[in-house]
Image: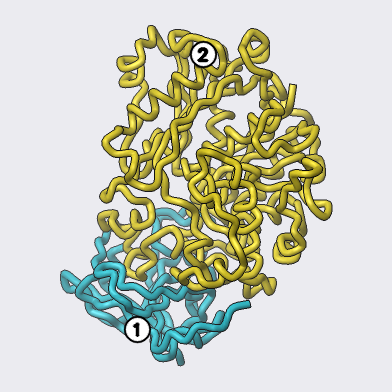
């Protein structure tokens, strides 16, 4: 059954800072970058900062992994007269695109009229994601994980990738193709961090950091901020840009995935998955669409195997067939035709977390908006539906489909 | 396809760099480990096993727990091969494993495995518990290839 709020809200403004290699945004601050992103999003939408009256965060309103965002602080800094909505999704990057659903909840409840969702991230030496789990102080829950020496997200994800290889015969070649196919989309992006074409030889020579994963299976560690503004359909008509309608959006997940790779209790087939099947089915139910109807897929790519597993969870291919799907070139974008390759749906036309920048999922929302506006750098021809996903991580994870106006 | 990497012996992480803390929910597990007794949290009403230990049974909502002595054997469910000591950053080959525990269906432990070369660890491999003294007098269960 169609979702009651289908196409009733729209993303109308997007704003981002430059993207910096980890730590290089210093001496900027997380609030300095966040304010730049918010003000740019207002300018893009053609509204005043004084019209923003809602915040819909994710990751527990975290600024990266160590800091916190606070609505009162933003009001003070940006001169916002009042807010009537301030909410966050829990856990981490899994909720990135779900924050647009949280914004929609506030808008449809008439709590707010223009709602900001954002992430701002600065990875100074004490706040580096790559080692964050190892640096956390010991508590009764992580005492069942930390002593194993699984101290970084890449370590944690490699255990899932190994199980997928065992169950389905998935190869490291497929992980490499995820990195190469999405790298091919950044050569003409001024802000992308990794732009040079990636060869299989370079991938194979990349150091093994957590076998079966190499350094090039890991996403970038970057700094920067991204903000987007969601409003109601009626208000969107008066904004500067073509609206990107919120066609379907969901967050949550199943108990069998739960805390995922900080728990490792998931039974098969959930263990070797992205944990997205539940929210994938919710957005398919909300929209009546299937993977076949999607024109571009912006899949949260913190690690290459998790792209492959999302392709299975969303039904771009059957479970266990991700290896062959990826190796047949179906992630690639063909600039000559503006379409996919070999019947596939182009994945991460912006280069993703692996190649453009890692702002905990918000760059995928920006690309989804640009694709349905029709002004993306690697524009998919006649792009009507863009899928964007949150990180395969502890619940909630999230899914978003934007529709062109 | 790249050549398989030769890592050599899978080592346990040094106990003197490992810490745990316990709560009322988890302490019986760690107290048993101190006595070199492997246990898992079991519901005293419906018999469902859960790890890590939590206050309430997710199957029947009972707060009553038991801590049966397990055989101390298990099966490798999945693993990673790591090559740097997480504290010092120096080259150090260790293999974090997720173990399905014999005698406690559905309960898993996350641990290190030793007793073979890292590249020879396999999913489905049988292992048995061994005990590593760590900081503050606690003892950590690790596993050795049978």
Looking at the rendered structure, the secondary structure element under dot 1 is loop
Provide the chain ID for the residue under circle 2. Answer: A
* Spot occupied by residue B26 in the image (x, y as percentages of width and height): 32, 62
Relative to A71, does residue A326 appear above or below in the rendering?
Answer: below
Which quadrant would the N terminus of chain B be assigned to in this image? bottom right
- Vertical arrangement, residue B82 with respect to residue A354, above or below: below
> How far is mark 1 from mark 2, CA to CA?
57 Å
Q: Position of residue A60 (x, y in %)?
A: 41, 36
Categorize mark 1 by other alpha carbons within 10 Å: few (<14), some (14-19), many (20+). Answer: some
The hue used for chain B is cyan
Front residue of this view, candidates A236 and A95: A236
The one nearer the camera, A274 or B83, is B83
Q: Quadrant of residue A239?
A: top right
Task: Tell us which disc is closer to us: 1 or 2.
Answer: 1
Q: How many marks?
A: 2
- Tags 1 and 2 on a common chain: no
Q: Is residue A173 left or right of residue A159?
A: right
Chain A, chosen colour in render: yellow
Check disc 1 and report the residue beneath it. B11
Give residue A112's mark.
2
Q: Residue at x 36, y 62 (%)?
A: A151
**Which residue is depicted at the point 34% across and 77% down?**
B141
Question: What is the chain identity of the residue bearing mark 1?
Answer: B
Q: Position of residue A176 (x, y in %)?
A: 61, 64
> Along the horizontal axis of the image, is B62 left or right of A140?
right
- What secondary structure is found at the residue carrying circle 2? loop
On the image, the x and y values in percent for residue A37 come to 44, 26
Q: Tell me the crowding category of disc 2: few under 14, some 14 to 19, or many 20 or more residues within 10 angstroms, Cα based.
A: many
């Amino acid at each position: 059954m169609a979702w009651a709020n289908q196409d009733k809200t729209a993303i109308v403004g997007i704003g981002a800072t430059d993207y910096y290699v980890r730590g290089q945004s210093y001496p900027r601050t997380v609030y300095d970058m966040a304010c730049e992103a918010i003000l740019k999003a207002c300018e893009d939408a053609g509204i005043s900062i004084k019209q923003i009256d809602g915040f819909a965060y994710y990751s527990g309103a975290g600024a990266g992994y160590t800091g916190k965002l606070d609505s009162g602080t933003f009001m003070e800094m940006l001169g916002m007269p009042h807010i009537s909505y301030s909410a966050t999704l829990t856990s981490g990057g899994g909720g990135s695109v779900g924050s647009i659903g949280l914004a929609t909840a506030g808008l449809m409840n008439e709590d707010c009229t223009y709602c900001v969702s954002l992430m701002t991230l600065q990875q100074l030496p004490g706040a580096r994601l790559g080692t964050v789990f190892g640096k956390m102080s010991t508590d009764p829950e992580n005492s069942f994980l930390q002593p194993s020496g699984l101290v970084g997200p890449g370590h944690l994800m490699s255990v899932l990738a190994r199980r997928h290889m065992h169950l389905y015969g998935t190869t490291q070649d497929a992980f490499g193709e995820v990195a190469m196919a999405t790298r091919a989309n950044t050569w003409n992006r001024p802000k992308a961090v990794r732009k040079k074409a990636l060869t299989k030889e370079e991938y194979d020579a990349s150091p093994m950091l957590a076998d079966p994963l190499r350094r090039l299976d890991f996403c970038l560690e970057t700094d920067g901020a991204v903000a987007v503004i969601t409003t109601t359909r009626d208000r969107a008509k008066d904004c500067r840009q073509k609206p990107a309608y919120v066609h379907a959006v969901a967050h949550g997940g199943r108990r069998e995935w739960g805390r995922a790779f900080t728990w490792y209790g998931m039974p098969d087939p959930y263990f070797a998955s992205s944990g997205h099947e539940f929210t994938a089915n919710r957005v398919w139910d909300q929209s009546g669409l299937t993977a076949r109807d999607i024109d571009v897929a912006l899949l949260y790519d913190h690690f290459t195997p998790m792209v492959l597993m999302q392709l299975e969870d969303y039904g771009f291919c059957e479970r266990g067939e991700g290896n062959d799907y990826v190796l047949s070139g179906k992630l690639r974008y063909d600039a000559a035709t503006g379409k996919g390759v070999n019947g596939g749906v182009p994945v991460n036309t912006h280069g993703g977390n692996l190649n453009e920048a890692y702002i905990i999922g918000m760059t995928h929302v920006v690309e989804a908006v640009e694709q349905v506006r029709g002004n993306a750098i690697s524009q998919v021809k006649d792009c009507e539906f863009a899928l964007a996903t949150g990180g395969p991580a502890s619940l909630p994870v999230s899914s978003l489909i934007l529709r062109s106006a | 396809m790249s050549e398989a990497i030769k890592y050599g012996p899978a080592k346990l992480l040094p106990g003197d760099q490992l810490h745990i803390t316990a709560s009322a929910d988890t302490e019986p597990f760690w107290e048993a480990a101190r006595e070199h007794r492997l246990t898992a949290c079991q519901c005293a009403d419906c018999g469902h096993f859960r790890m890590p230990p939590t206050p309430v049974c997710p199957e029947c909502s009972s707060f009553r727990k038991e801590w049966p002595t397990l055989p101390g054997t298990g099966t490798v469910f999945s693993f990673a091969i790591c090559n740097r000591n997480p504290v010092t950053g120096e080259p150090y080959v260790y293999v974090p494993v997720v173990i399905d525990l014999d005698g406690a269906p559905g309960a898993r432990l996350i641990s290190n495995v030793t007793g073979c070369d890292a590249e020879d660890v396999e999913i489905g491999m049988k292992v048995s518990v061994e005990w590593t003294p760590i900081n503050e007098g606690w003892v950590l269960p690790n596993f050795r290839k049978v």
